[in-house]
């Protein structure tokens, strides 16, 4: 079986000769479960068996080890559309592989690409294949072919990464702020900083789309420092003195960055801020990456007086033990928890139970995505500490925030 280098060489020969071929990538899902169950030696044997099965299914093909748990299969250009070959692989891997007395069903994900002699470079072809396998891995088990939609999506990602690079250089990212209502103080005393990006034509791009891409492409560091700097500048300017604090969102990479703590310290010093003015929001996905390290960084920053919010509680990424084991001062209930609230009795039970539990543990609660007066009333009634949502205030640029905080009349605000 060839390796990745062999695969590249083979591809470049075929591309140079303008040959027609089909490439199929096979990725194994959750292979660590197999290693855990059988041990690494037998795990490796299952990998070799996977390759052997592919060779057996397609005697005219060539199999390469593409990654740790990924294989590439180079095949002659199909007579039909090549989909039958994908089905053949799926059928085979629905049945267990057998090694001596051991049997395992491996979960496979498939991606493929048909090259009919078009002009590709090896790099672009590998990028297309890897992207398609990535989509297949995130999908529901259907193979992903690199054409049409997948090709457009990859192009959009590439365009977006270059837009982000350019926007960073030209300082075109903006930080917006969503005021957060403090139910005890009956006032907006906090805000969350949220990044904003638009195309040169002014079309806004959702952070839900560009943040994950910034994380993958390594741009998130620059973006996070930009937000930190902006927030510190805003807080030190005296224009938003109604705000006791502003929270920023940090991704995984910042936590693993050894520069995080000194950087935060420097920023607070430069702008003469109290550490309590800055709050940090992280999701459990960030925290769970490396619990030991996260705990150490959080302890260090908590020691300095910076507090943490556990973001998006109630989505797939959160569990109670994370909230309990790490020094979070506050938990943010995700807006998905509010979808049937307060109309549904179950939803009321859930929210009120969670609020009581967190308060018992001395953890404050923010409800996110408050969209109606009924929600605000019910949440305020059950003792939620902070409310955030379109019903109270939308995210807004800095100038609008200043006006909002300085001119907002109490009567004009929703009564909570
Ligand atoms: P998040 O941290 O959960 O931020 C709250 C999101 O909820 C914001 O979306 C906000 O506009 C939206 N939202 C606020 N009130 C309501 C409401 O009443 N209803 C609904 N449906 N949504 C509401 P946004 O600004 O689009 O940001 C999306 C996500 O992008 C954020 O979710 C956060 O995970 C990420 N993000 C934004 N800025 C940054 C940043 O500077 N750094 C990092 N690492 N992530 C960021
Ligand atoms: Ca957040
Ligand atoms: Ca959130």
Image (cartoon, rainbow, N blue to C red):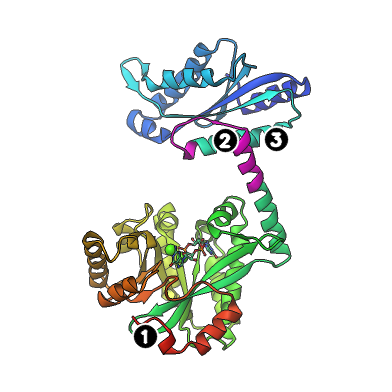
Image quarter (top left, top right, bottom left or bottom right) of the C terminus: bottom left
Residue underneath mark 2? 132
Q: Residue at x 43, y 82 (%)?
A: 188
Residue underneath mark 3? 123
The secondary structure type at the circle numbered 3 is helix
Is there CB contact under 8 Å for labels 3 and 2?
A: no
C-alpha gap between disc 3 and disc 2: 14 Å
Q: Residue at x 68, y 27 (%)?
A: 8
Q: Residue at x 48, y 87 (%)?
A: 408
The secondary structure type at the circle numbered 1 is loop
Number of the front mark, 1 or 3:
1
Q: Residues within 10 Å of mark 1 (few under 14, many from 20)?
A: few
Q: Which residues are magenta?
A: 137-157
C-alpha gap between disc 1 and disc 3: 58 Å
Image quarter (top left, top right, bottom left or bottom right) of the N terminus: top right
**Side of 168 relative to 131 (left or right):** right
C-alpha gap between disc 2 and disc 1: 51 Å
Say if 23 sits above or below 186 in the image: above
Q: Residues within 10 Å of mark 2 (few under 14, many from 20)?
A: many
**Side of 208 relative to 270 (left or right):** left
| Mark 3 / mark 2, whichever is N-terminal | 3
Give the number of the disc on residue 186. 1
Is there CB contact under 8 Å for labels 1 and 3?
A: no
Q: In x, y percent, where is residue 215?
A: 56, 54
């Amino acid at each position: 079986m060839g390796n990745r280098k062999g695969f590249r060489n083979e591809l470049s020969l075929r591309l140079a000769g303008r040959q027609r071929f089909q490439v199929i990538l096979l990725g194994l899902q959750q292979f660590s479960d197999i290693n855990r169950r059988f041990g690494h030696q037998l795990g490796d044997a299952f990998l070799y068996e996977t390759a052997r099965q592919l060779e057996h299914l397609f005697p005219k093909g060539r199999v390469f080890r593409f990654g740790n748990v990924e294989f590439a299969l180079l095949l002659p250009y199909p007579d039909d559309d090549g989909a039958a070959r994908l089905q053949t692989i799926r059928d085979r891997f629905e049945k267990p592989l057998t090694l001596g007395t051991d049997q395992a069903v491996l979960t496979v994900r498939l991606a493929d690409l048909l090259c009919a002699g078009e002009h590709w470079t090896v790099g672009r072809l590998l990028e297309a294949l890897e992207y398609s396998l990535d989509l297949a891995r995130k999908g529901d088990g259907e193979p992903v072919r690199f054409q049409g939609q997948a090709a457009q999506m990859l192009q959009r990602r590439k365009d977006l990464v270059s837009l982000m690079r350019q926007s960073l250089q030209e300082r075109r990212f903006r930080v917006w702020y969503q005021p957060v209502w403090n139910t005890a103080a009956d006032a907006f005393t906090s805000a969350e900083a949220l990044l904003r990006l638009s195309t040169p034509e002014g079309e806004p791009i959702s952070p839900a789309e560009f943040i994950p891409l910034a994380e993958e492409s390594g741009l998130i560091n620059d973006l996070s420092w930009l937000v930190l700097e902006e927030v510190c500048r805003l807080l030190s300017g005296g224009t938003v003195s109604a705000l006791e604090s502003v929270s920023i969102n940090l991704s995984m990479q910042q936590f693993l960055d050894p520069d995080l703590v000194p950087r935060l310290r420097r920023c607070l010093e430069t702008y003469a801020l109290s550490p309590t003015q800055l709050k940090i929001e992280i999701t459990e996905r960030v925290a769970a990456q490396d619990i030991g390290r996260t705990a150490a960084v959080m302890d260090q920053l908590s020691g300095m007086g910076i507090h943490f919010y556990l973001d998006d509680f109630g989505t797939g990424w959160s569990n109670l033990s994370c909230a309990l084991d790490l020094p979070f001062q506050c938990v943010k209930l995700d807006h998905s928890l509010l979808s049937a609230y307060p109309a549904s009795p179950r939803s009321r039970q859930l929210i009120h139970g969670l609020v009581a539990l967190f308060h018992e543990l001395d953890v404050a609660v923010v409800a996110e995505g408050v969209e109606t007066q009924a929600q605000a009333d019910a949440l305020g009634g059950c003792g939620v500490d902070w409310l955030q949502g379109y019903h109270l205030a939308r995210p807004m640029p800095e100038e609008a925030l200043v006006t909002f905080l300085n001119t907002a009349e109490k009567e004009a605000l929703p009564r909570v």
